[in-house]
Image (cartoon, rainbow, N blue to C red):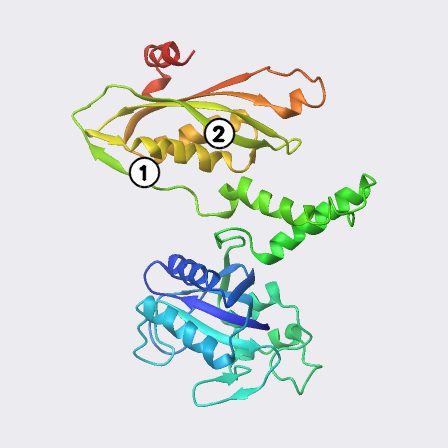
């Protein structure tokens, strides 16, 4: 496998979406393994052409492809994004450049590595600093050339941090999974276990995969599929009961689980697809939280994203931090409620409570 650094950018259309889509497509290829993604930066365009600012980032990956094969894959992603580049340094929907390829020096008709202009560009250097792990960057013949020194050579191009953890990968990146594995080994060692015995040898990997699943609400893009359907229902309450959920208490990282009940009052003669409420609960629960905040989050997200006159949410859950530790009171349940819009009126609240209590 070769280790590679890419510089990625976009300044046409939904810039962030173009970058996310390209990275997701690369991450799904069996020949590419994304290792790390830098923060997202907004940069002034380079060159004389008048255009909008770019979003730029850097990517570290492993690949079994040779440089020419990888270039072909990257160009296919640019074509899929309907890339346009009428003039040099002009605007484009997607730009994917190989900056460094496993320390190799390459000069072909299609490809020059290290990238000759890279160390002059702040939009390349700054993101690379976030994820750089090598001894040198631009010339394998000059091992004393440090990335930080290169930053002093770039122009005063405008650059602003947009978002640190912006890339909603489909699951955790390998570097993040490795962090969880190492932390799990430390915990097991601290409590006196032997992390090398057969029963525990693969436990850190299993824990990492488990965390990627149960905390997917933080890792993946937020649920946003609030699909509405036309209806004759103008103001009648719609209630979905007994939505089973599992979540993790943020105080002890132990599960709490139970059932959620969601009601809303339609407006504009539209109702929400029933499965969307279960999807919303599933996504909101997939993160460390407390039941009180989870209840409010579900109510607020539905009220803010769907054309409804009001929302009511009730959750009844059992908490393992009460049943298996501490006071150890099994089968005790906690009930929480949240109301938005018209459900803040007592008559509507009572209509909801009569059905769920």
Count of number-bearing discs: 2
Q: Nearer the viewer, residue 286 or 158?
A: 286
Check the image and name the residue furthest to the front.
Answer: 198
User: Residue 125: which disc?
Assistant: none
Furthest-left residue in this view: 232
Q: Is residue 287 left or right of residue 342?
A: right
Camera sees residue 239: yes
Q: Residues within 10 Å of mark 1 (few under 14, many from 20)?
A: some
Read off the residue under disc 1. Answer: 226
Q: Position of residue 334 (x, y in %)?
A: 55, 17
Residue under the image location 51 percent in, 43 percent down: 216
Instruction: Give the Cα distance between marks 2 and 1.
Output: 19 Å
Circles 2 and 1 in contact, beta carbons < 8 Å: no
Quarter of the figure with residue 240: top left
Q: Quadrant of residue 127?
A: bottom right
How would you rate the neighbour count of disc 2 (Cα within 10 Å): few for under 14, some for 14-19, many for 20 or more? some
What residue does disc 2 label? 245
Q: Residue 125: percent from the left, percent from the top?
A: 56, 71
């Amino acid at each position: 496998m070769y280790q590679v650094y890419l510089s990625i950018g976009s300044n046409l259309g939904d810039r962030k979406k173009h970058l996310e889509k390209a990275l997701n497509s690369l991450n799904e290829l069996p020949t590419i393994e994304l290792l790390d993604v830098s923060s997202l930066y907004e940069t002034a365009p380079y060159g004389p052409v008048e255009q909008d600012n770019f979003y730029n980032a850097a990517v570290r990956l492993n690949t079994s492809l040779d440089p020419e094969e990888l270039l072909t894959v990257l160009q296919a992603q640019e074509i899929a994004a309907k890339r346009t580049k009428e003039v040099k340094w002009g605007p484009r929907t997607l730009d994917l450049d190989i900056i460094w390829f496993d320390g190799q020096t390459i000069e072909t008709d299609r490809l020059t590595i290290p990238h000759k202009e890279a160390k002059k560009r702040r939009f390349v250097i700054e993101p690379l600093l976030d994820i750089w792990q090598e001894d040198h960057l631009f010339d394998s013949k000059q091992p004393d050339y440090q990335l930080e020194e290169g930053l002093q050579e770039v122009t005063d191009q405008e650059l602003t941090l947009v978002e640190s953890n912006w890339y909603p990968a489909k699951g955790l990146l390998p570097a993040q999974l490795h962090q969880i594995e190492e932390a799990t080994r430390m915990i097991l060692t601290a409590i006196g276990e032997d992390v090398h015995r057969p029963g525990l040898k693969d436990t850190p990997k299993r824990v990492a995969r488990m965390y990627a699943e149960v905390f997917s609400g933080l890792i993946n893009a937020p649920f946003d599929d609030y699909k509405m359907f036309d209806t004759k229902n103008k103001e009648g309450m719609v209630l979905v009961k007994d939505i089973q959920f599992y979540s993790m208490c943020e105080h002890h990282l132990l599960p709490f689980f139970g059932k959620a009940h969601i009601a809303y009052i339609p407006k504009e003669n539209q109702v929400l697809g029933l499965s969307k409420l279960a999807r919303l609960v599933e996504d909101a629960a997939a993160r460390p939280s407390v039941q009180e905040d989870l209840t409010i989050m579900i109510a607020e997200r539905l009220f803010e994203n769907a054309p409804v006159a009001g929302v009511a949410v009730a959750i009844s859950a059992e908490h393992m931090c009460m049943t298996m530790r501490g006071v150890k009171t099994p089968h005790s349940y906690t009930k929480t409620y949240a109301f938005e819009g018209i459900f803040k009126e007592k008559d509507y609240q009572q209509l909801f409570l009569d059905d769920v209590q």
